[in-house]
Image (cartoon, rainbow, N blue to C red):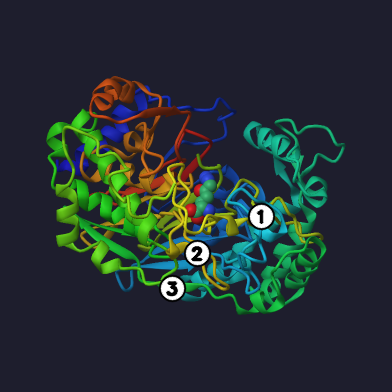
């Protein structure tokens, strides 16, 4: 049996009996959810059981993984309102079996034409409300993915979401808690309270039903009239009225002018694999690629996954790649991003050689020239793969949980607050994590820098691993650790997803880590090398899948850290 046969056997046999690392797992009603799934025809893994089921419904109706991913995306806009969305943005990685190529459907939001630092005085990286809204990308992104790769009629892909919004769905404990908390937020808009509040004004309880009739109407308009309904038609009008009511900046021209793009992804080779991540305006592909190449020369496999040397080298790679992120990365349509240089073998070899095995390099020592002086939780990642060979890894977001907290009146959907992802301290890069470099400065029409990192790994030119996560700047490190876990250490996907995570982002100069035995045991050794460790409850929520190269079996693994649902057939 080859290595993957063994890994698969381990997944099937060992993982069932193994007690998983409990990293901040939230107790909740999981009876309806499958954490793992195996199947011969296709797999869907997302944060929401209803959305996962929507994807399976579309696969069973003859759709491919891109059709199913779009259906999952629309369904999440109903069942996971903290991050699922119509008026946010993201990145969809697609493996197309016809061309045997990976593409990035990039649908990141843009700054409205009227946006400027002068106009937005007082705005901070924590702002919500109408000014924080970037021109939404999701609907154009899904429409582009459908036009290019889809096979079922567009309207069919919206059916599950329409049904969920119209008939309602059962609220489970995590959603009840999340809604009850956000409805107390001082900036929650009146319309948000009306749409998402329990009709009798009392707190949501697990088992209640949430119906979203305005959203059902919006989805129906999208089904009937396509994406133009959102960017030029009746939905656009509702958005513009909302902007006028709240002093937002988005104009009819901004909406009509929004374009999603198919962009060549970032690709690096790691041992026998090709790892693909999204290009700018995401920092994910470049930073992930750099980290993999920075650790590749070291004897990680020999040391083992939980050896202090391994963790040390991984953290040092994170520190260096995140400094390059701070220094260079932004929207490449507006600023020069030296992509080739940042990923060139010579540069990475030199950078890798600066890692001192005995001592953490203080972040102050690196990047002193730009230095002048926890991420909020919600984005969501899902994956789909099908028997025809398509594979999709998609991350999308409203930025903060529930985005701007503005629900478009009459439209029933939340607007993003992605404008907060621009650099709001121009000229001031500080030790607390604010980045003030020019690459990600606000400019009209520009896309704000993202950390979203949906990943597709190919082996022998075929999809092998699909992963990604929410978590703001921690996203890239979550994707990195899962990818490395499988590719370098031959871990089963289950173990790689469960494995406790660390995060270093250059500044602040500290290592966040998930409290779990494996890392607690390394704590002393890492501190002795000069790392400052800070425990956190959890990092990321990485719904992932693998396709076993020898058997073709689809393996779905939901992340147990929050909620998640894997289905295969
Ligand atoms: O695009 C980005 O990098 C951020 N807007 C993502 C925000 C996020 O992941 C929040 N948390 N889970």
Residue 334: where, in percent of width, then height? 45, 74
Residue 517: where, in percent of width, then height? 34, 20
N-terminal of the pair, mark 2 or mark 1, is 1
Q: On the rendered image, what quadrant is the N terminus found in?
A: top left
Marks 1 and 3: which is nearer the front? 1
**Residue 352 vertical position relative to residue 345 in the rendered view, above or below:** above
Residue at x-position 48% and y-position 27%? 24
How many other residues sit within 10 Å of disc 1, few (<14), some (14-19) or many (≥20)? few
Residue at x-position 42% and y-position 47%? 475
Label 3, on which residue?
A: 262
Label 1: element kind: loop
> In which quadrant of the rendered view does residue 325 lie?
bottom left
Q: CA distance from mark 2 to mark 3?
A: 24 Å
Q: CA distance from mark 2 to mark 1?
A: 16 Å
N-terminal of the pair, mark 1 or mark 3, is 1
Label 2: element kind: loop
Q: CA distance from mark 1 to mark 3?
A: 35 Å
Marks 2 and 1: which is nearer the front? 1
Which disc is residue 441 wearing?
Answer: 2
Between 237 and 399, the one nearer to me in the picture: 399
Residue at x-position 25% and y-position 34%? 311
Q: Do callouts 1 and 3 mark residues in contact (Cβ within 8 Å)? A: no
Question: Position of 170 compared to 271: left or right?
Answer: right
Label 1, on which residue?
A: 122
Question: Position of 332 compared to 482: left or right?
Answer: right
Residue 51: where, in percent of width, then height? 58, 49
Q: Is residue 564 visible?
A: yes
Residue 289: where, in percent of width, then height? 28, 56
Which disc is residue 20 wearing?
Answer: none
């Amino acid at each position: 049996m080859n290595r993957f046969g063994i890994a698969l056997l381990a997944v099937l046999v060992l993982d069932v009996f193994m007690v998983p690392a409990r990293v901040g797992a939230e107790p909740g009603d999981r009876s309806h959810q499958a954490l793992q799934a195996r199947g011969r025809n296709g797999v869907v893994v997302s944060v929401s059981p209803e959305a996962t089921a929507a994807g399976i419904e579309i696969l069973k109706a003859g759709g491919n993984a891109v059709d199913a991913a779009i259906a999952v995306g629309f369904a999440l806009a109903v069942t996971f309102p903290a991050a699922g969305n119509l008026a946010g943005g993201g990145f969809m990685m697609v493996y197309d079996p016809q061309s045997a190529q990976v593409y990035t459907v990039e649908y990141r939001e843009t700054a409205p034409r009227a946006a400027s630092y002068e106009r937005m005085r007082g705005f901070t990286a924590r702002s919500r409300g109408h000014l924080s809204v970037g021109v939404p990308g999701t609907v154009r992104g899904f429409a582009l993915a459908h036009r290019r790769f889809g096979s079922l009629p567009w309207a069919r892909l919206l059916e599950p979401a329409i049904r969920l919004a119209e008939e309602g769905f059962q609220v489970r404990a995590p959603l009840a808690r999340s809604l009850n908390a956000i409805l107390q937020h001082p900036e929650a808009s009146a319309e948000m309270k009306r749409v998402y509040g329990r009709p009798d004004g009392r707190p949501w309880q697990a088992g209640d039903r949430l119906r979203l009739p305005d959203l059902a109407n919006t989805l129906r308009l999208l089904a009937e009239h396509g994406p133009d309904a959102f960017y030029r038609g009746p939905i656009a009008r509702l958005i513009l009225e909302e902007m006028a009511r709240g002093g937002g900046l988005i104009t009819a021209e901004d909406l009509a002018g929004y374009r999603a793009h198919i962009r060549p992804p970032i690709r690096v080779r790691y041992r026998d694999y090709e790892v693909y991540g999204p290009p700018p305006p995401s920092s994910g592909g470049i930073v992930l690629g750099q980290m993999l190449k920075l650790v590749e020369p070291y004897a990680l496999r020999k040391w083992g996954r939980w050896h202090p040397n391994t963790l040390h080298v991984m953290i040092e790679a994170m520190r260096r790649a995140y400094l390059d992120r701070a220094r260079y990365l932004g929207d490449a349509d507006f600023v020069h991003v030296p992509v080739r240089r940042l990923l060139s073998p010579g540069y990475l070899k030199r950078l890798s050689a600066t890692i001192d095995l005995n001592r953490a390099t203080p972040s102050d020592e690196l990047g002193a020239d730009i230095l002048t002086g926890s991420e909020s939780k919600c984005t969501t990642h899902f994956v789909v793969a099908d028997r025809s060979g398509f594979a999709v890894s998609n991350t999308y977001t409203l930025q903060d949980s529930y985005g701007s907290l503005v629900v478009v009146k009459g439209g029933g959907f939340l607007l993003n607050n992605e404008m907060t992802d621009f650099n709001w301290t121009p000229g001031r890069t500080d030790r607390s994590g604010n980045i003030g470099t020019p690459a990600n400065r606000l400019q009209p029409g520009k896309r704000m820098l993202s950390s979203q990192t949906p990943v597709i790994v190919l082996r022998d030119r075929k999809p092998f691993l699909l992963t990604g996560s929410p978590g703001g700047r921690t996203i890239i490190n979550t994707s990195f650790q899962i990818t490395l876990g499988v590719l370098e250490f031959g871990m089963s996907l289950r173990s790689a997803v469960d494995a406790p995570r660390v995060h270093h982002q250059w500044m602040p100069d500290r290592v966040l880590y998930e409290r779990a035995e494996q890392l607690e045991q390394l704590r002393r050794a890492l501190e002795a090398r000069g790392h400052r460790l800070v425990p956190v409850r959890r990092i990321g929520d990485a719904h992932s899948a693998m396709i076993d190269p020898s058997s073709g079996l689809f393996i779905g693994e939901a992340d147990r850290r929050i909620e998640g649902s894997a289905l295969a057939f």
